[in-house]
Amino acid sequence: MGPARDLAIVLVSGGMDSAVVATRVCQNHEPAFLHLDYGQRTEARERRSFEALTQYFGVGRRLVARVDPLGRIGGSSLTDLSLALTDTHRKDSNIPLTYVPFRNTHFLAAAVSWGEVIGARWIYYGAVEEDSSGYPDCRERYVEAFNRLIAEGTRPETRLAVVAPLLHKRKWEIVREGARLGTPFQLTWSCYGGSEQACGECESCRLRLKGFREAGLEDPLPYRERS
Amino acid sequence: MGPARDLAIVLVSGGMDSAVVATRVCQNHEPAFLHLDYGQRTEARERRSFEALTQYFGVGRRLVARVDPLGRIGGSSLTDLSLALTDTHRKDSNIPLTYVPFRNTHFLAAAVSWGEVIGARWIYYGAVEEDSSGYPDCRERYVEAFNRLIAEGTRPETRLAVVAPLLHKRKWEIVREGARLGTPFQLTWSCYGGSEQACGECESCRLRLKGFREAGLEDPLPYRERS
């Protein structure tokens, strides 16, 4: 046995990107899985994937918490059921309507608070800048700004940094890396529709399917039969 | 009537500092009051002060939300009932045990998310750096880092900035400013004990009473009779 491994928190949504990150972390660190319920329409299904991944990797250190404010303010088609998923953009903005205002700051804040208490060294998070939806809180400059915030806003003895290893990866590269590491893609969930079978047609399904296609691999997830 | 006033969110805890900030904001901006319940032992009492202040200032735009992760992780004597309020510091740290890990990031994140949805221009927050308890997330460098995070992590069209007008004020100056502006101090609550009458002896009561004493003013709040 080697020396004790660093404790690393992974934000595990249940989607494929964070599952690939989780696979890597479980191989290199002492993992702690964090899942946030922010009132998104697909939470029940994503939560099942989170539980399945936790069990698959045998992770004992886990925390599920709610991000209550995001469910109360609306403004995104992922949390506000009065907005249709088919409306993709507001007229005055390049940012998609699926954008949840400042969402990742709530997630990372939860990870930092937990990390200070359990003495974690790293926070791994599967944000993807390129080949994704153009959310402002999925960019390298955002991650850098967040790391400065940790340095200023925590105990002087706290050593905690956010790592976003997929930031500059294309979706097909993430699929390839997951396949190489042994990520159980069949346990993950990406569809915004949130029924028993993935729809294959929403923005998120299309991105996922394109990634598998370009990687030359087959997505093990069953998709709804198209009529 | 002058031009339409900027919409400003105020973090209103129910304490005296945020009540002074709220007084100023109500005189200069269109106010929106935000209160966060983070599982602190005194929440029920603080919530009553928040409601009383909201009614006093006639503020229609209000949001109360929970910060669920902080209640789940413990690590602070304000949220973890297994820690005594009389234990003031951990042996290995200069930061008091009442410090709630990264707490203000959760608060400000809620304000930014809400602010993006309602189109606010400012977030007012009553953090006090000097003459306070030495929390890392109550310092000017923290506020600056948070404003960079907003710039990187929100829609390009979002104009939102955190203002912490009390940051460099001493407690007695805050009392004086509140008295000048007409802050209803009798509606506020500072005691960590959280019973019907303030204890007058906890860290927070002592800081408040010292502030009134040094300002040469009387605190209108009733305190428990000392035996």
Image: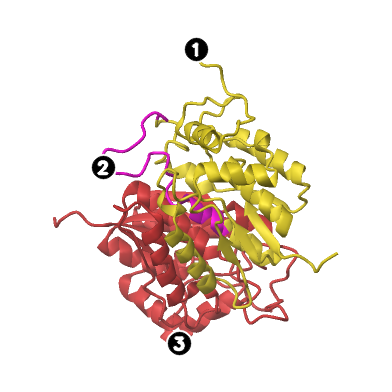
Chain colours: A red, B yellow
Residue type of the residue flagged with mark 3:
Glu
Depth check, mark 3 against mark 2: the one in front is 2
Q: Chain of mark 3?
A: A
Determine which quarter of the picture holds residue A74. bottom right
**Disc 2 secondary structure class:** loop
Q: Which mark is residue B92?
A: 2
Residue B132 in the magenta stretch? The answer is no
What x and y, as percent, mark residue A127? 45, 71
Q: Chain of mark 2?
A: B
Name the foreground residue: A147 vs B1.
B1
Q: Chain of mark 1?
A: B
- Principal secondary structure, stretch drawn in magenta: loop
| Residue on which the image places disc 3 | A214
**Quarter of the figure that contains the N terminus of chain B:** bottom right
Determine which quarter of the picture holds residue B114. bottom right
Q: CA distance from mark 3 to mark 2?
A: 52 Å
- The crowding category of the residue bearing disc 2, from other C-alpha atoms within 10 Å (few below 14, some 14 to 19, many at least 20), is few
Name the foreground residue: A168 vs B66.
B66
Name the foreground residue: B216 vs A102.
B216
Q: CA distance from mark 1 to mark 2?
A: 35 Å
| Residue on which the image places disc 1 | B227
Residue type of the residue flagged with mark 1:
Ser
* B123 sits left or right of B104 in the view: right
**Disc 1 secondary structure class:** loop
* Whether residue A27 is situated above or below residue B183 in the rendered picture: below
* B52 sits left or right of B142 in the view: right
